[in-house]
Image: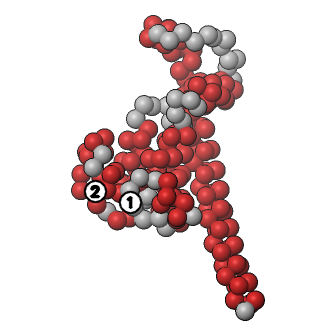
Amino acid sequence: MKSFFSRWLPDPHSLRTHKSLRFLGDHLHDPRLWHFSRRSTVRGLTAGAFFAFVPVPWQMILAAITAVWLRFNLPVAVAMVWITNPLTLPPIAFVNYRFGAWLLGRPPVDWHFEPSLEWLLRQAGDLGLPLLAGSMATAVVAGIATFVLAHLIWRWAIISRFRRRRGLAHSR
């Protein structure tokens, strides 16, 4: 698991010098932020999954602040936020809106997207609360599911590796 994350995530130096993360200052030199232990990595995955579904434009910054504050793996938390990206955001927002309308007991509004600020402001009243409710509920569920699944997968990987080693030892 560690080698997988180490291979695909940016190195600590490039993140420490990234202009968007400079506001964290010396906090970025804490080695716990870069350690790929099970606890640190799973917590980073959990925070990233949670903030990926929070409907604000500063998701990566929120994930980074949380990782620094609670001292878990920063690059994993920031990378995990990219679950929602320009390609996945529209369908995720649509599902979150429908889920939020269902949670609030409201019938979903039939609407057609227009890429303008005027349309957005006009629709904010009808779409805003259900989208927020659905997004926050999805964020909590995604965070919990990620925590449980990541722990189970990490544990399975450790047990599999141990069994392979033990099998090799017995075959000699």
The kind of residue tagged 2 is His
How many numbered marks are there?
2
Asked if residue 57 is positioned above or below residue 63 in the image, the reply reads above
Which numbered disc, 2 or 1, marks the residue that appears first in the sequence? 2
Residue for point 47% across, 10% down: 116
Q: Position of residue 31 (x, y in %)?
A: 34, 65
Local crowd size for mark 1, using a 10 Å CA cut-off: few (<14), some (14–19), many (≥20): many
| Quarter occupied by residue 152 | bottom right
Look at the numbered disc 1 and give the secondary structure of its residue.
Answer: helix
The kind of residue tagged 1 is Leu
Label 1, on which residue? Answer: 33
Residues at marks 2 and 1 touching, judged by CB atoms closer than 8 Å: yes
Asked if residue 39 is positioned above or below residue 63 in the image, the reply reads below
Residue 71 visible in the picture: no
Label 2, on which residue? Answer: 27
Q: What is the spatial separation of the Cα atoms under label 2 and label 1, in whole angstroms?
A: 9 Å
Q: Nearer the viewer, residue 18 or 90?
A: 18
Q: Position of residue 163 (x, y in %)?
A: 71, 79
Q: Residue furthest front?
A: 172
Q: Position of residue 120 (x, y in %)?
A: 49, 13
